[in-house]
Amino acid sequence: DTEVTQTPKHLVMGMTNKKSLKCEQHMGHRAMYWYKQKAKKPPELMFVYSYEKLSINESVPSRFSPECPNSSLLNLHLHALQPEDSALYLCASSQGRLAGAPGETQYFGPGTRLLVL
Amino acid sequence: AQSVTQLDSQVPVFEEAPVELRCNYSSSVSVYLFWYVQYPNQGLQLLLKYLSGSTLVESINGFEAEFNKSQTSFHLRKPSVHISDTAEYFCAVSDGVGRGSTLGRLYFGRGTQLTVWP
């Protein structure tokens, strides 16, 4: 099973709302990623979790708050977003092997399409 | 950091014609190369990858890509396209895992929109 699931599929929120995006995988992967993708652009890396610890934060504004409650789940908490944050938010996972291993394959979920009004 | 160049932002072709989507990457000691496909309103799906071994890699739906180290290229080809191949194609490169904060991160090209016309 190489499936990464994401909920919800679509989300509309106001600038004062608080919402959360959820991502789940059951492949035993220990690295999980959040990406943001604008239309006609490649995905932009936001956060990387390795063994449930935040290892990369690409200078993302604090209105985005990631959380990794266990090895299968990854959340992205949203608060006080701006209209320019409207995008497709993609979650991915990979094995998370030790240093020196060859490049890992990242498996992507279908994404959550977010619209901020 | 790695960089990936996809020179063609759009490639229109007729059904059953051959197609090549170009991808070049910046040189490194060792790289690992991927092609992902994104159908409209969907996430990214892995199409094929090169980690080591044979420089020609194939996907189950007829695409193939060849790793050319001397030309730092990983072009994607299909001898005969179908309308269902219409999608955005992203080339990506990774330079391995566990090197500090890189953690095998992917560097994406800007994408190539393949449109197949009947």
Image (spheres, rainbow, N blue to C red):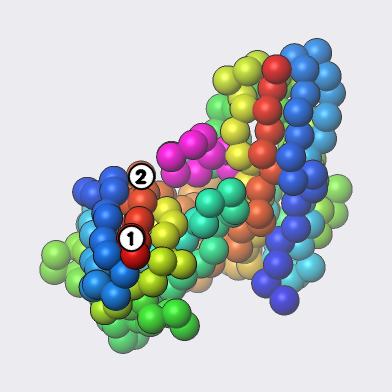
Please provide the residue range marked out in magenta.
A34-43
Q: Position of residue B115 (x, y in %)?
A: 35, 56
Q: At numbered mark 1, what does the secondary structure look like: helix, strand or loop? A: strand
Badge 1: chain ID? B
On the question of residue A56 being in view, the answer is no
Amino acid type at mark 2: Arg
Q: Quadrant of the N terminus of chain A?
A: bottom right
Confirm whether the magenta stretch covers residue A37: yes
Nearest to N terminus: mark 2 or mark 1: 2
Number of other residues with Cα within 10 Å of mark 1, as a class: few under 14, some 14 to 19, many 20 or more = some
What's the residue at 69%, 43% (across, down)? A112
- Secondary structure mostly taken by the magenta-highlighted segment of the chain: loop
Q: Position of residue B64 (x, y in %)?
A: 33, 77
Q: Position of residue A113 (x, y in %)?
A: 67, 39
What's the residue at 61%, 58% (across, down)? A108
Residue at the disc numbered 2: B110
Which of the 4 image quarters holds residue A63?
top right
What's the residue at 54%, 63% (across, down)? B45
Tell me how many marks there are: 2
Distance, label 2 to label 1, CA atoms, is: 23 Å
On the question of residue B33 being in view, the answer is yes
Residue at the disc numbered 1: B117
State whether residue B116 is above or below residue A113.
below
Which of the 4 image quarters holds residue A107?
bottom right
Q: Are marks 2 and 1 in contact (CB under 8 Å)?
A: no
State whether residue B76 is above or below residue A40.
below
Q: Quadrant of the C terminus of chain A?
A: top right
What residue occupies the far top of the structure in this picture?
A16
Q: At numbered mark 2, what does the secondary structure look like: helix, strand or loop? A: loop
Amino acid type at mark 1: Trp
Q: Is residue B51 left or right of residue A45?
A: left
Confirm whether the magenta stretch covers residue B4: no
